[in-house]
Image (spheres, grey):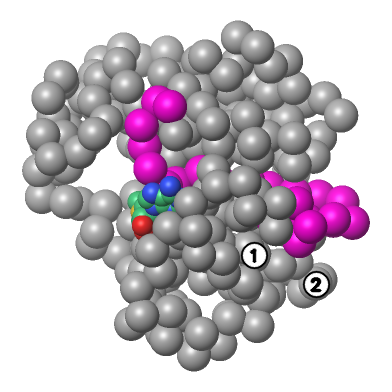
Amino acid sequence: MKEPFEKEKQESIKNLARSIDLKSLSNKWLADVSVYKYSYNFSWMGRPIIQFPQDIIAMQEIVWSVKPDLIIETGIAHGGSIIFYASLLELIGKDGQVLGIDIDIREHNRVEIENHPMFKRITMMEGSSIDEGIVKKVYEFAKGKKRILVVLDSNHTHEHVLKELELYSPLVTKGSYLVVFDTVVEDMPEGFFPDRPWDKGNNPKTAVWEFLEMNDRFEIDKEIEGKLLITVAPDGYLKCVKE
Ligand SMILES: C[S@@+](CC[C@H](N)C(=O)[O-])C[C@H]1O[C@@H](n2cnc3c(N)ncnc32)[C@H](O)[C@@H]1O
């Protein structure tokens, strides 16, 4: 029963991904809802999660298929995503852990995260994700872990994300993913984020493109964005294809 279903699904995803009309409709939709701060509308187990529901589902599929021992995320904010990953690892039932890094963990967020039932699987580090001392601590924490998934969702400038890609990509294990959020900035009109240092030409997607020119361990998983259509991570779902 499963095989014909999977085959049909793959076929319709391919057709969907080919639809230029739907792609441009999705981009228009993404730009229009951004004005209303759409990504701030949701929560996971009570904590605000700054993600689109479509990407949350994609991450669920990835976590279930990889079953990581460790998920590292840069950019904690209110903690919704690290709690989401921890809840999936809890359901998987092994001893998977989540490590979150943020330059500024606000006291009220820290208290809520530490009092959350999923905190038992979470460790937080405060500091810049590209700070030498933090990176050293991350590598110590990751020692001995066999399957590692990395999610980059902190400062979205080209320079910062490229540095994160260089520092964190060696931790990602073959078959797992390196997910780079907010690559969608490149697909928005110029000047769309007037109060932010990132823009068209200077964002996570341009960093991914430069990174992939010098690194052959990762490939963009086009099937994920092909089936989501609405995603903040086009070209941001990177599959690790080499040891
Ligand atoms: C988009 S929010 C993260 C959202 C979170 N991942 C979620 O899904 O709910 C970005 C976060 O990155 C943090 N940040 C900014 N610059 C950083 C840096 N250099 N290192 C680590 N975190 C940083 C900010 O403090 C902020 O909390």
Write down the quadrant of residue 25 in the picture. top left
Which amino acid, by three-letter code, is at mark 1?
Answer: Val
Residue 152 in sight in this render: yes
- Queried whether the magenta region covers residue 146, the answer comes back as yes
Q: Which mark is residue 242?
A: none
- The front one of 112 and 184 is 112
- Up the image or down, 122 lies above or below 233; here it is below
At horizontal 70% and vertical 58% (from top left) the residue drawn is 137
Q: Is residue 10 above or below residue 94?
A: above
Rendering coords of residue 81 (x, y %): 47, 62
Q: Position of residue 235 (x, y in %)?
A: 48, 24
Q: Secondary structure at mark 2?
A: loop
Quarter of the image with the N terminus in it: top right
Q: Position of residue 79 (x, y in %)?
A: 43, 69
Dot 1 and dot 2 residues touching (CB under 8 Å): no
Q: Which mark is residue 95?
A: 2
Q: Secondary structure at mark 1?
A: strand
Density class for disc 2 (Cα within 10 Å; few <14, some 14-19, many ≥20) is: few
Q: Which residue occupies 65% across, 21% down?
A: 219
Q: Name the kind of residue labelled 2 in the image.
A: Asp
Q: Choose mark 1 or mark 2, whichever is in front.
A: 1
Find disc 1 in the rendering and name its residue: 98
Q: Is residue 67 visible?
A: no
How far apart marks 1 and 2 lie (CA) works out to 10 Å
242 drawn magenta: no
Circle 1 packing at 10 Å, graded few (<14), some (14-19), many (20+), is: many
The stretch in magenta equals 138-159
Q: Nearer the viewer, residue 27 or 173?
A: 173
